[in-house]
Image (cartoon, rainbow, N blue to C red):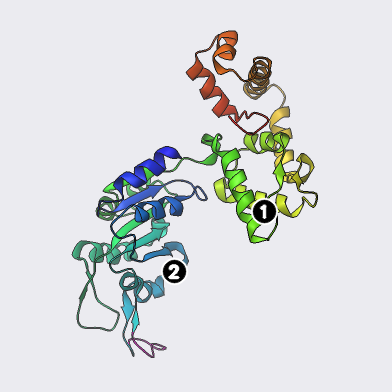
């Protein structure tokens, strides 16, 4: 995640469009806001819109605005989302969900830097930096003619990829503690303690819903810790059952059983050598970098949550 954040800060001062790719729930909007905060537009609006949530019939009106009488129910002039974001940043989330007909209309505005409200006869200039995000493989979508190639190249001058949480397990203890503090404060309570056993469980789970799923789980854990300590018993049954099934593995699944054995072997060695990575690596016949990669891969954390 550090790499994504560093990249976001590096490209912040540019005015070029940005495409942020990654699975749902990985924190793409967070990265977009970091880009905005590092840019000269930081004092100007940051307007986020979920492209998949706007009905196709209302897309032009919502994004470009309309004039009074443009259609039934249009009682007064209304500025669109582009005008609201003028001078700042427009974050187009899930841009890959846009219908082809809408992609063409969006492309024209991005190319010309001007728009026309629905029902209007004149155009207006706009100055908006567009940051887009998608959980789809847009290059694959282009091959199947579901996403316009010209729009893709227009929005993807700069690109950032946000790794799914299962590939950056070292972030889990940090994120867990962050969400504990955040949601405890929202409820006016002291942040509860989280045990090492709980961190081990969270670190071993694959998190298909990514950071969003982890935050939801932390909110749930806070609700079930009246004594100020989050214990293993409070962890969702879904997570515990999933890990138990993974550990058991189907009969004859050598790969999963070997992975479980390797994880426990590394943990035992780390505890034997008081978490001294150099001595542990020598004992296991690994390089220090090789040991670190395996520790990250298996989500192995120390009692205090350190990796």
Q: In this view, does 156 lie to the left or right of 274?
A: left
Residue 73 located within the stretch drawn in magenta: yes
Query: Disc 1 designates what residue?
Result: 219
Q: Where is residue 226 in the image (x, y as percent from the top left)?
A: 79, 52
Question: What number is the disc on residue 82?
Answer: none
Q: Earlier in the sequence, mark 1 or mark 2?
A: 2
Crowding at label 1, few (<14), some or many (≥20) Cα neighbours within 10 Å? some
Q: Do the residues labelled 1 and 2 touch (CB within 8 Å)?
A: no
Q: Give the range drawn in magenta.
A: 70-77
Q: Residues within 10 Å of mark 2 (few under 14, many from 20)?
A: some
On screen, residue 6 above or below 56 = above
Magenta span: predominant SS is loop
Please identify, in this view, whether the residue under mark 1 or under mark 2 is nearer the observer. 1
Helix, strand or loop for disc 2? loop
Q: Is residue 204 left or right of residue 76?
A: right
Residue indicated by mark 2: 54
At a point 25% along the width and 83% down the height, the residue shown is 120
Q: Work out whether 43 lies above or below 287.
A: below
Q: Does the magenta stretch include residue 215?
A: no
Instruction: Identify which residue, 150 or 101, lies in the foreground.
Output: 150
């Amino acid at each position: 995640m550090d790499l994504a954040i560093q990249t976001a800060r590096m490209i912040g001062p540019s005015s070029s469009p940005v495409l942020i790719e990654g699975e749902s729930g990985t924190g793409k909007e967070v990265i977009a806001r970091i880009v905005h905060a590092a840019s000269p537009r930081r004092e100007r609006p940051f307007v986020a819109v979920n492209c998949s949530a706007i009905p196709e019939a209302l897309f032009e009106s919502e994004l470009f605005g309309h004039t009074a009488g443009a259609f039934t129910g249009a009682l007064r002039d209304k500025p669109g989302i582009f005008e609201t974001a003028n001078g700042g940043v427009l974050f187009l989330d899930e841009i890959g969900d846009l219908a082809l007909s809408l992609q063409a209309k969006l492309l024209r505005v991005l190319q010309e830097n001007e728009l026309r409200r629905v029902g209007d006869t004149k155009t207006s200039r706009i100055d908006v930096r567009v940051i887009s995000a998608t959980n789809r493989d847009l290059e694959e979508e282009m091959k199947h003619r579901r996403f316009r190639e010209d729009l893709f190249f227009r929005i993807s001058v700069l690109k950032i990829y946000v790794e799914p949480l299962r590939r950056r397990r070292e972030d889990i203890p940090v994120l867990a503690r962050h969400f504990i503090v955040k949601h405890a404060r929202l409820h006016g309570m002291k942040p509860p303690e989280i045990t090492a056993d709980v961190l081990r469980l969270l670190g071993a789970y694959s998190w298909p819903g990514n950071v969003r799923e982890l935050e939801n789980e932390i909110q749930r854990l806070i609700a079930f810790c009246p004594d100020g300590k989050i214990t293993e018993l409070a962890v969702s049954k879904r997570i515990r059952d999933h890990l138990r099934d993974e550990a058991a593995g189907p009969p004859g699944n050598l790969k999963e059983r070997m992975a479980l054995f390797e994880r426990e072997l590394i943990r035992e060695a780390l505890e034997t050598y008081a978490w001294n990575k150099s001595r542990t690596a020598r004992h296991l016949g690994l390089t220090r970098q090789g040991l670190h990669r395996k520790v990250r891969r298996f989500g192995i954390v120390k009692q205090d949550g350190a990796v």
